[in-house]
Image (cartoon, coloured by chain):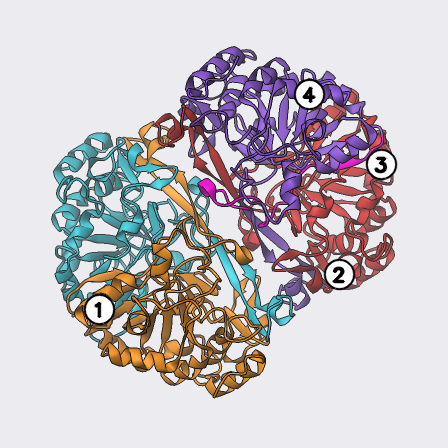
Chain colours: A orange, B cyan, C red, D purple
Amino acid sequence: MALDRTDPEAEVAAAAKACSNWGRWGQDDVLGTLNFLTEAKRLEGAALIRRGESFSLSLPFDMNGPQKGWRRRTNPVHTMLDTGTDAALGNQGFPHGIGGADDVIAMPLQCSTQWDGLGHIFDHGLAWNGRRAEEVVTSEGDLVTGIEHMAAPIAGRGVLLDVGRAIGEDGELPDGFAITAEHLDATAEAQGVAVGRGDLVLVRTGQLARARRGDGWGDYAGGPAPGLSFTSAGWLHRSEIAGIATDTWGFEVRPNEFEHAFQPLHQVAIPHIGLLIGEMWDLDALAADCAADGRYEFWLTAAPLPVTGAVGSPVNPIAVK
Amino acid sequence: MALDRTDPEAEVAAAAKACSNWGRWGQDDVLGTLNFLTEAKRLEGAALIRRGESFSLSLPFDMNGPQKGWRRRTNPVHTMLDTGTDAALGNQGFPHGIGGADDVIAMPLQCSTQWDGLGHIFDHGLAWNGRRAEEVVTSEGDLVTGIEHMAAPIAGRGVLLDVGRAIGEDGELPDGFAITAEHLDATAEAQGVAVGRGDLVLVRTGQLARARRGDGWGDYAGGPAPGLSFTSAGWLHRSEIAGIATDTWGFEVRPNEFEHAFQPLHQVAIPHIGLLIGEMWDLDALAADCAADGRYEFWLTAAPLPVTGAVGSPVNPIAVK
Amino acid sequence: MALDRTDPEAEVAAAAKACSNWGRWGQDDVLGTLNFLTEAKRLEGAALIRRGESFSLSLPFDMNGPQKGWRRRTNPVHTMLDTGTDAALGNQGFPHGIGGADDVIAMPLQCSTQWDGLGHIFDHGLAWNGRRAEEVVTSEGDLVTGIEHMAAPIAGRGVLLDVGRAIGEDGELPDGFAITAEHLDATAEAQGVAVGRGDLVLVRTGQLARARRGDGWGDYAGGPAPGLSFTSAGWLHRSEIAGIATDTWGFEVRPNEFEHAFQPLHQVAIPHIGLLIGEMWDLDALAADCAADGRYEFWLTAAPLPVTGAVGSPVNPIAVK
Amino acid sequence: MALDRTDPEAEVAAAAKACSNWGRWGQDDVLGTLNFLTEAKRLEGAALIRRGESFSLSLPFDMNGPQKGWRRRTNPVHTMLDTGTDAALGNQGFPHGIGGADDVIAMPLQCSTQWDGLGHIFDHGLAWNGRRAEEVVTSEGDLVTGIEHMAAPIAGRGVLLDVGRAIGEDGELPDGFAITAEHLDATAEAQGVAVGRGDLVLVRTGQLARARRGDGWGDYAGGPAPGLSFTSAGWLHRSEIAGIATDTWGFEVRPNEFEHAFQPLHQVAIPHIGLLIGEMWDLDALAADCAADGRYEFWLTAAPLPVTGAVGSPVNPIAVK
């Protein structure tokens, strides 16, 4: 059934109704689809560690990142409190020849490789599980579903769906390419991997590789990009995955698939499905390895920094094969 | 042989000479003892995932943390760029009923649960592997051994040495208790676990539990504490462990074991041994589980946030048993 | 008429009704009592420059300030982007021998010597001039009465009422001392100065001098303090002053004069009178000079940093006699 | 005598020798040319207040500023700790109907309208008055000449030299236009104003007006610009002015007047002359007023925020005519 491109509000409402997980894990739930990530799933994931090689899926956190200031999102500003130069010059006043360096950072929690928390997106003033947005996220942060609740569980079976490699040209999907359920299934089949309940799914579009090849980030932050189609909401729901991440700024295809819209799939996925979404993950080295050995599944740990009340978190995801 | 409590400089020099790993992994090394954490070690660690239960070993990152401003180290300041209240009141200007919340943080990289990077400590102006401190860590950060180099490898076999439980009273060591090699070995033996090359060792003193029980952090940050004895440098070196972390602010015993000293064990461990050190880890829940099932080893992932040039990093370590 | 110490809400309502300036300067007003500060008043102030000596009334902005973390208010964290040590060591890469130092700051806008903006305080959800608080100050800042509107006008006649010197013992009022209209008038008379429409009034209690003499700030931020009595609201209104500042954290007496209350005079003064309030001003050097020459009036410039949408601003007020 | 465009180092050395003020105010001096700003000069300035109108010469401090990330200089990030929306919704927990808003900022001290401190620029490792840069500005800030020393004195006679209006076309100088001593003198003469010892001189090029008219800042921060010629060093020295500020990012003409150079006039003006330099001042409204009434002199207060150890400061300069 085709989307009505002129009426995102109605399409969001329909998808939200079809895909809602409200109440599925009780009224007090703060984990959403992370509930699918069970101990059994972790055992399954652990069995995928065969060679012992680890991969970081994080971009570097520095001023060379993709942010351009939209909605006050800057790149991380890292400054030193103490340096080796000062230590060498004897400026520090410590005894017996010890010297030190120390540092601070100021950054948006979603400036680079990240998880969206459940308090990140609302639908008509409602947050995950049907709570009122104004009772969940105030100036003091997310009082209910803060990212700290997700401190422990995000370790399990990871699956890479390298849609760029399976369907794109030269390993990359063009900007504006909408990844549908069919593309996801076709990729899984082509790469010989099954996606199931509780998995952490990584979708590679190749856009990051393209950005890196060029001379700068350009419009990576917020501009045109390949990404999940709004129509994939059903797949995201029925697959019962625990979380999903992409190598793009915004997870879903951009421009969005409606005439006047802003991230409509988020509006279904986070408040209604309760889905854990990751963005700006660097999947290229892992994807190359998967292509080389034909194994698209692995152990994945992607622990957020437990900032109390945060609606998102930087993360350094570690895949081990 | 007893320490000369009046001459930390000489003791540091002697220990540094005895324990140096300079050149062991080549002149260009940026990993130090993480070189011991091999793929084989990761396979060994993976085999320890038996039940699939995961534990976060991180403190919450918020204004209720232990920092008191020493050397400009504050607790994390987390503020909102957008909130649910604004979304609910229609202040955001987004279409089709979508609303959002977003946030920023400003914090020292070593304000809470953390890793020290190799550029964190110098001995007489020399950094890890004998490099000149002023050529390693400038105002632009650690140009050589920045924490980003450790983005991928820190996943392997974790071992808990619950010295507080094994040797302390009611599970806790008193402030000022210096943990020696003998204490570490006795604990390992009592708890039926072996420590070997490439392991990530967690030493629990019980001080954090004590701080949590009381009414506030008190002098947790920088005050008296149990911790590793300066004399344990040899053990840290010959055990060939990949990293070590404690539930205290400063890793080593405080007051330090010399009349006028500041963190002398750091001065040996980081620049000379190249040892990865973690501090302010919350080991209590994991320790309770280990005591319950008698298994003090597990899979551990503790990926730093790869802030380019950082000399330390917040971390949310995840143990899986 | 005595305050009903059990019913701050009723007392606030009565004072608000008696002292309201809503609509006095039109519906679009964003300046409040600053409207009283006319060009004629500036000429009057300029005539007070007799010797040409200037005084800064600002505390130093640094980590040694009074903040203790209440409501995420920290002291300013100042860090360097580039240093002289790096310049000296040739680490900067600039040509022809030029070197540089540069720095950043992270701070609450009300961490030290400051102005409260008109969007700082609300009464039952209403801001200055009767506007709805939620339409004035959102996560994006004060959209209506941001401190940037006060960028230019705050220069005029300053008057010091050194109540500590006039009424206190050894120049200081004790904590908990409530300064009434009678105290203000008596001080003005004793010091031979008149307060009139459009003046910028500085009220010295001596508490800052006491804090400085002791060994640290103690509870200066939020603890017991001398300050304006709730009953002074009428004086603040009828005097038609343009602004007022004190040498205390919170302007009004603390503990507040009701059984369960929080800064009730603010609740009248800012949203209803539209009064510009300054806090944590260092009046001691100026006061000593005024005592010496017997002249308690001067030219005063106290320009806020025009941070767009800010509800307060750090300020370095300059008095010239 | 023409500049040797191929040898900035030699030209800097010659100018530094010719213009040095080292030792002029003693070995301990921390004020440089601010020493010229005497009480007599302030009386002279005060006499210029004729109408009582005040002008802010500051840009707004917000994310729409000119910074683009060069050397980690961002625009100011202003976030809210508490908001009116939360107050309106009763989220704050205060008694008797009081609500509040509060905010924080993170910014480079030289991100917008600013003063350069004396510790901002070095020449071959030497700071103002011949001090060694590494003993002046460490990671802890400027230990000797921090901007806090300038907290009080910057109030006096201001003079506007509107070179854009006097010499430019349509009130603006083109990018790359080097303002010489002759241009400065001709402008002063054309505008009927004299520049003398102790004055605070404001040089308007018109570049800011041009930036504001266009669609964004473009390369305002660091790109081509009109500005002071390197050859004006002698004028800056012999005029014995107390300070000088421009409406451009970098004070001196850009591209600089040498083949390979970076801000060579700074290298003479700050460490050798000890000159107070301001940048990114918004002179347009004041200039229009001066053109209208033909009076190019006024009272000027431009107090830096006294951040301890800062090498620069944001400033909201206030001119009163």
Image-based side of C20 in relation to C279, left or right: right
Residue C165 visible in the current orientation = no
Q: Secondary structure at mark 2?
A: helix
Image x and y of residue D232, in percent: 58, 19
Q: For the stretch drawn in magenta, what is the main secondary structure? A: loop
Disc ID at residue A291: 1
Distance of mark 2 from mark 3, alpha carbons? Answer: 38 Å
Residue beneath disc 2: C8
Image x and y of residue B212, in percent: 40, 59
On the rendered image, what quadrant is the N terminus of chain B found in? Answer: top left
Residue D208 visible in the current orientation = yes
Residue B159 lies, with reference to residue C63, above or below; the image says below
Residue beneath disc 3: C39
Residue D91 lies, with reference to residue C152, above or below; the image says below
**Chain containing mark 2:** C
> What amino acid type should be assigned to the residue bearing mark 4?
Asp
Residue D213 lies, with reference to residue A282, above or below; the image says above
Q: Secondary structure at mark 4?
A: loop
Image x and y of residue D68, in percent: 50, 45
**Dot 3: within a 10 Å radius of its alpha carbon, few (fewer than 14), some, or many (20 or more) residues?**
many
Q: Are marks 1 and 3 in contact (CB under 8 Å)?
A: no
Stretch in magenta: D51-75
Question: Residue visible at 75% across and 39% down?
Answer: C154
Distance of mark 1 from mark 3, alpha carbons? Answer: 75 Å
> What amino acid type should be assigned to the residue bearing mark 1?
Ala
